[in-house]
Image: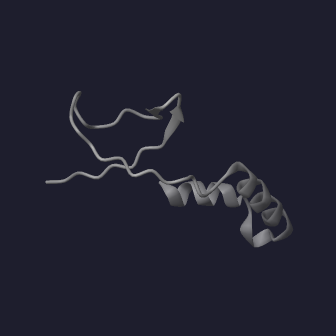
Amino acid sequence: MEQIEEIEAIYEDGVFKPLKKPHPSDNERVVLVVKEKVITQEFLRKFEILGERLSKFRNPSKLLGEDRK
């Protein structure tokens, strides 16, 4: 059965460095799907400013973080 796991990584000097330990065994072949991070620090900063202006949306970056888990 195919297992899908999403892991954030940093690309540095031609190598993907995962930010957490992946499940595959050593020397196991995997397929990488590369996508740019959509939610940037700049986006979160602007979202926080919006949250300060609209009391209904207090701490929006926390809500986004919880939603992404």
Image color mode: one colour
Q: How many marks?
A: 0
Residue at x 13% of width, y 54% of height = 1
Give above or below for 24 relative to 55. above
In-image side of 34 versus 31 (left or right): right
Q: Residue furthest front?
A: 14
Give above or below for 16 relative to 46. above
Residue 51: percent from left, percent from top: 78, 64
Residue at x 80% of width, y 69% of height = 55
Residue at x 57% of width, y 52% of height = 37
Residue 8: percent from left, percent from top: 47, 43
Residue 24 vs residue 14, the one in the foreground? 14
Residue at x 77% of width, y 58% of height = 48
Residue 27: percent from left, percent from top: 22, 29
Residue 50 vs residue 5, the one in the foreground? 5
Residue 57 vs residue 14, the one in the foreground? 14
Give above or below for 21 relative to 2. above
Q: Residue furthest right?
A: 53
Residue 11: percent from left, percent from top: 52, 36
